[in-house]
Amino acid sequence: MEYRRLGKSGLQVSELSLGSWLTFGKQIENNIAEDLMKMAYEHGVNFFDNAEIYANGESEIVMGEILKKMGWARDSYIVSSKVFFGVQGLINSTPTQKGLNRKHITEACHQALERLQVDYLDLFFCHRPDKSTPIEETVWAMHNLITQGKILYWGTSEWSAQEIMEAHMVAKQYNLIGPTMEQPQYNMLHRHKVEVEFTQIYKTVGLGTTIWSPLASGILTGKYNTNIPPEATRMNIEGLEWLKDKTLTEQNLAKVEQLQSLSRDIDITMPQLALSWALNNCNVSTVILGASKLAQLEENLKASELKTRLNPELMEKIDVILGNKPEHPNF
Ligand code: NDP
């Protein structure tokens, strides 16, 4: 495992990390979640990603129990939470139980600490921008949590470059700590934000990125190329029809088929190709893996050592297949 600085901060995060969306507290049994975290940690993963909304708080409870049971030194891992949607989701939360106002940010942090059974969160993300809270209020609330020792770094998720810069301007104006990292979606089928929109802010504010859905929810494994497999898999989860409609398009599946053939040429699997491709972008601080089975995680963790197989010639071929080359800045 290799470690990268989280943007311009001094925090060293493993280039592959493990997330819990849709899996912990929902799709998988707790003993599988435990095995996944154990395998990840033993392979050098030091960052575990979570959020208040994941399985309505249950994901943090499961992760907290595992962290307690494993007894890993608190200074050996990084754990995150995210605030915005509320534990019950935007529709079912009361007006004070969601958003990025000072009250909900403070409450959400306290509740995440309790569910995760830790004294502080290493990373705390604003899960989405909140148009109904002044940015000053959000930046002050996050800064105060840092000075109180309840969080160490704060960041954003799915904010635009402009919104991130506004937060930095407020932080500068009042001498506060600004956002260190952003959590955007980034994968072979979703490139614009990371490769185009953020280009300037990597330089100006030293933005770190903890990227999500590196396999586009599993489409980049190639397992959906011909049909949706009947066994338990994300695309069969009730309520995720929107995800299916958005991602399982003919155009995407045609690209995956061609990419899969490239992966065979260099003797790696399709998920390993997709993950190695993301790892080869120097503006990515960590690629957050998702897995519902131990075998998936085992396969995916190998991307760390296989990433060098993607030479410039192969990266060119990938760009031709993807057909929308923005700018993938390689190491
Ligand atoms: P991926 O796109 O990598 O999808 C992971 C899923 O793909 C797995 O759960 C599994 O689903 C399938 N899969 C993974 N590896 C393999 C394999 N080798 N072979 C076959 N199938 C495989 O990542 P996620 O979408 O899970 O995102 C990762 C993390 O990012 C999340 O856990 C969360 O922490 C974070 N995230 C953050 C968001 C945000 O808004 N900030 C939004 C979404 C995620 P299955 O077995 O069910 O098919």
Image (tube, helix red, strand yellow):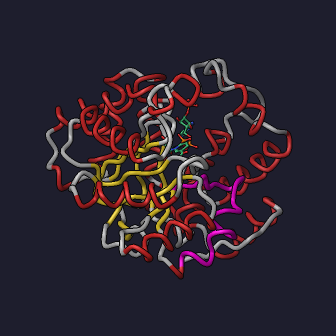
Question: Is 42 one of the magenta-colored residues?
Answer: no
Viewer-proximal residue among 312 and 20: 20
Which corner quadrant of the figure contains ligand 1?
A: top right
Asked if 211 appears above or below 81 in the picture, the reply is below
Determine whether, in the image, residue 131 is placed left or right of residue 28.
Answer: right
Residue at x-position 20% and y-position 41%: 118
Determine whether, in the image, residue 190 is placed left or right of residue 68.
Answer: right
Residue at x-position 37% and y-position 54%: 141
Picture coordinates of residue 75, whole percent (x, y): 17, 55
Residue at x-position 52% and y-position 63%: 279
Give the quarter of the figure containing the N terminus: bottom left
Report which quarter residue 241 is drawn in: top right
Magenta segment: 183-202
Determine whether, in the image, residue 1 is placed left or right of residue 303.
Answer: left
Report which quarter residue 224 is drawn in: top right
Circle count: 0
Picture coordinates of residue 254, whole percent (x, y): 83, 45
Determine whether, in the image, residue 272 is placed left or right of residue 261.
Answer: left
Asked if 183 appears above or below 280 in the picture, the reply is above
Residue at x-position 76% and y-position 66%: 319
Picture coordinates of residue 10, whole percent (x, y): 31, 73
Viewer-proximal residue among 91 and 9: 91
Viewer-proximal residue among 200 and 246: 200
**Residue ranking furthest to the right:** 250
